Amino acid sequence: MIVSNTTSAERGIRSSALTRSTEPATDTVRAARKGRARTSPLGLVMLAPALALLVAFFFAPVVLTTIFSFTNMTSATGISGGAYVITPNLLRDLEWQGMAPEAAQSLSGETISVDEAALERAAAAGVDPDFLEEIEDELLGDEFDDARSFERELKTLPSRPRRVRDLKLAAEPFSQSILNTRFATRDEAATAIASIAPDLSAEDRNTVLSAAYTGWVWTTDNFERLATTPETARLITNTALYVGFTLSLFNVGLGLFLAIAIFYMPKTSGTIFSVLWLLPRITPVVLYTVMWKWFTWDDGFLPVVAENLGLPAFNYMKGSVPTAWATIVSLNGFIGASFGMILFSGALRAIPQQQLWASEVDGASRWQQVRRIILPQLRWPILFVTCYQSLSLLSSYEQIWLTTNGGPGNTTNVWALEAFRVALSNYTGNLQYGYGAAMALVLVVAGLALSIIFLRLFRFNELVEKPKIEF
Amino acid sequence: MTRNFSAWPVLLVLSLISLPLAIMYASVFVDSFTNTPPGAILPNEFTLAHWRFLVDPSIAGNIWVATLNTFIFALSMVVIVTTISAMGGYAVSRLNLPYRRFFLAGIMVMHAFPSVTLIIGVFLVLQFAGLYDTLAGVIMVKATLMLPFGIWIMKGFYDAVPWEIEMAGVQDGASRFTVWRRLILPQVKPGLIALGVFAFLDGWGEYLLPRILAPTSEFRVLSVYLQQISVTDSINYDFNLFKSVGLYYTLPVLIVFIVFQNRLMNIFGGGTKG
């Protein structure tokens, strides 16, 4: 056993006499004093599962978000690379963009060749085996320019199908067009183009190939789009308003009020209020948001009360911009207030009661006590709540998503919600992973920067104590 | 303390602010047992009709399967989060590790870091790993997002255990693992229980991850069930049915909360929600 008391001596906290007396003067202790610590294999084993999960679902997502924010990935391009497909629509688009009509014409042509691969395809398609055998004997290796001449040739064979429709079906597997065919690699697609349209210029071929790619490509368009679209400014303003109002009015303001009011209250009524305010935090979010719907919607509680009082009654959640804002701010604030309440209550209990007694002897009123004694000592908890909650508010969108969903119009949309909707939940069906990742990356960077500042602020070093046993 | 300040204005303001919450929660209870005529505020008759969903799956689907799924989900969360946090927290609190400071800083940053912004990246990871649309994938993601919080909380509890206990054990010839298992774990039991309860509540209420990461899976949790009955077309929309299901859904949470209230207070201080 090796005991080092370097840190305890420095910090003067847990340096008990026992630690000193049991300390054997071995080499390792001296090594530990110099700061060389032996790695504990047990520690690595115990940390391994946490590390594995954190790397897979915390670190990797951050890296992937960064990587994919530089792509144009959408649900149309897929996420695992794409294929090369030339469609008639694509050729028409390219013609509009100035490609020569002859080039497009040559690409849409078809070739008919009788070879092993075609025979296999025909067999798979269920063509009569006797007929196929004859085709193989008579026509193997032949090529035809159009379907009609091939069918004419087929009609000369003895065991051909009687019906014209069957004959056409039998001929189909032999014809090949590059239109609507999936090519896995660029080379395959290029070879196919070369064989069907040998006259196509290299420049045209490259244009066609790039346009035909269905997968995602690297691009910085996402960030350009973010920087230029006017929607960005609105989202930033909304997010700032949302975080600012919720934080100042509820998470800090109301939290502080609740904590101080409960602090001065008799114990039982204090408990009732603190439990009531904790309820939003533990209520499942789906139920909580629908409770607010019931509270603010057309036939809900508030509009009915307002109607009876002769005040304007409408759907407060979605009916007008100010009421929608009031709803989402208080809806989130009611959850957030309890965080401040608990933290401030803890800090209040840590204030020595004698200070309050002394102030009362000196004739201070409650307001003076709060103003001169309590608030100055709550400076750090307030700063902590501000930092911590601004981070979580910055990225919270679940409640807004389930209530106003950014409406009316886009007036209560915030950055995190928009990123989420763009990437994972939009109604047009094409999910833009790349653009959404770029939006999320902005939040990730902001979150990282803020949490690092936040660590500096709260003296991280004090939280990290060196182990006292090396074993 | 003397009463040199009249308390009732503060009490009045406090009650007024708390009124919306009180009304909302009271209404959940009252409305699930009564009918209210349209346009009125107070109910006029008592009924148990809104609770028929418990026996009649044709109303909103089979609630018992959803309940079982939610239990599986929440209990898996408890097991994974407490086990891994108990081990990881001990390692970072008491054992010598390379880059320990760096790791602790990372845990701190991750703890403060708004993890919901990662959902797009998580979605892509699950797609690559083939875990998209599976129960296992959602559980692992949810548990991982809670790990920084869990490890941090457990580290705090381990830090408060006196070194002397550990030294005594080591002195008597026990290995570090035995010391942890036999001597230290019982010391941090309050922390483990609080963390477990917290993980249970978090898993029980989770909506976003199952909805986004397992949208079509057979596995339907209560939150998704509840959301589905709240978006049926607005003409048949039945707030009272919703509230009954909602009350049913929240009862376990309330029971757990009442039983473990004092233990939870320790841990809510480091809560994760906005």
Image: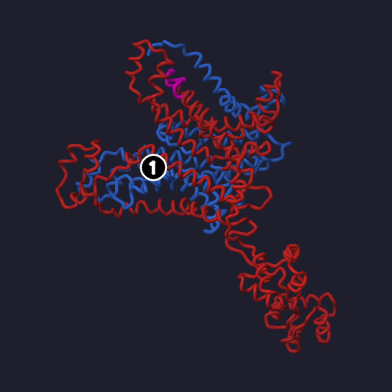
Chain colours: A red, B blue
Residue drawn at (47%, 45%), measured in percent from left and top?
Answer: B75
Q: Position of residue B144 (x, y in %)?
A: 46, 48
Give the amino acid at mark 1: Trp
Q: Chain of mark 1?
A: B
Q: Residue furthest bottom?
A: A137
Q: Is residue A401 visible?
A: no
Magenta stretch: helix, strand or loop mostly: helix
Above/below status of A321 relative to B19: below
Please identify the quarter of the rendering in which residue B248 is found. Answer: top right
Q: Which of B171/A333 is in front?
A: A333
Residue drawn at (57%, 30%), measured in percent from left and top?
Answer: A330
Q: Position of residue B185 (x, y in %)?
A: 32, 43
Give the residues drawn in magenta, as a range.
Answer: A258-269
Residue drawn at (43%, 36%), measured in percent from left and top?
Answer: B270
For this view, does B121 lie left or right of residue A302? left
Above/below status of A143 relative to A104: below
Residue drawn at (61%, 59%), measured in percent from left and top?
Answer: A78
The residue at which mark 1 appears reads as B152
Q: Position of residue B246 (x, y in %)?
A: 59, 35
Q: Residue furthest right?
A: A163
Is residue B58 part of the magenta span, yes or no?
A: no
Above/below status of B114 relative to A259: below
For this view, does B53 lie left or right of residue A373? right
Q: Which of A81/B136 is in front?
A: A81
